[in-house]
Amino acid sequence: MASTVQCLGYKAFGLQILSEFPLPELPRTEQPGRLGSVSVVEADLSERWEAIPKISPNLGMAEQEVMFMVKGTAVFSIQNGSTITVSPAVHADPDSIRLFILGSCMGVLLMQKGVLALHGSSLVLENKAYALVGRSGAGKSTLASYLMDQGHLLVSDDVIPVLVHNGTPLAVPGYPQQKLWQQSLDYLGMNSSAYRPLFKRETKFAIPVHDRFQAEPLPLAGIFELSVQDGPVSVEAISGLERLHTLYNHTYQKALVDPMGVREWHFGMLASFVNRLPMYRLTRPEQGFSAPQQTELIFETITQKVKEMKI
């Protein structure tokens, strides 16, 4: 289990993460990040968990603190956008603990810091960042991995921090790892025995991508929402109020926006750039591997948009 003595510095999500828990997926750093530094520590949270007002049996919330419990893994506390405290369960799987630190905890912490986070994958296409969003099973990770095989760099997987400066959104890098289901590995001709399951008995795997990672922020130039339905691969522009709904629907940890009391902030963030960001719905058939056709349509769409902007 994690040491309470040694604290190592890591880099992810624009943050320096000073952690008592080893986070081997993350690059090491001794420097504060663009968004500052945060601490990840181990402590007994049993009394605080009993005392905090509950939103549900596994979720508690007080001013500037969110706590949640994952049975058999840990109780987690995220405070003030600066500290993540972990109280591991007996015999908890360290891989599972790490997964929640780098996922759910970071999503809450970014929201506490006033940083918008989208749920999806972001890649470098034509020297700018584009986000792939969609419901679970829509094929985000498979398409992202295919694009990376074509030479395009990963900006972030799962959690995409977005900074907004003068109405211009900027995609902040996550860390150099992708998560892929067994089916995605099969489609892409990758042998799962070469990769580590995210945690015990899991059929989703951790894929290191150090050589295919964009380490610096880039302008977020567009969003493609993936959906599945009968028919051929197709793309259509998302317009009007639906653009705002799309951003809201694909906000990381969107269910916490109201309980945390940040709805006004969240709406303001989305409204500040929604009309400047091209958005498209990319539809694929449920069966078969269509990433090549999706990729072709994405680049046709980007090229057409660039031409329109020059006119």
Image (cartoon, helix red, strand yellow):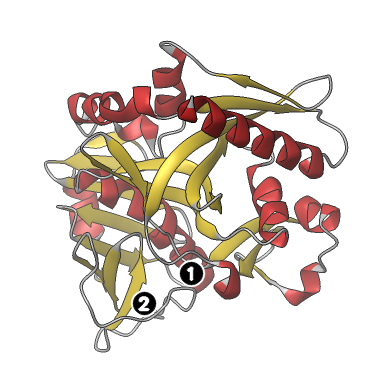
Q: Residue at x 78, y 68 (%)?
A: 192
**Toward the viewer: 156 or 263?**
156
Q: Quadrant of residue 89?
A: bottom left
- The three-letter amino acid code for the residue at tag 2 is Phe
Q: Answer with left or right where residue 7 lies relative to residue 220.
A: left
Mark number displayed over residue 275: none
- The three-letter amino acid code for the residue at tag 1 is Ala
Question: Is residue 163 placed above or below 77 in the rendered structure?
Answer: above
**Toward the viewer: 192 or 31?**
31
Mark number displayed over residue 21: 2
Q: Earlier in the sequence, mark 2 or mark 1?
A: 2
Instruction: Measuring from the top left, give residue 294's x and y in whole percent.
Output: 74, 37
Question: Is residue 81 placed above or below 211 in the rendered structure?
Answer: above
Q: Residue at x 48, y 48 (%)?
A: 129
Question: Is residue 308 placed above or below 97 in the rendered structure?
Answer: above
Q: How far, Cα to Cα, is label 2 from label 1?
A: 13 Å
Q: Residue at x 47, y 49 (%)?
A: 128
Mark number displayed over residue 92: 1
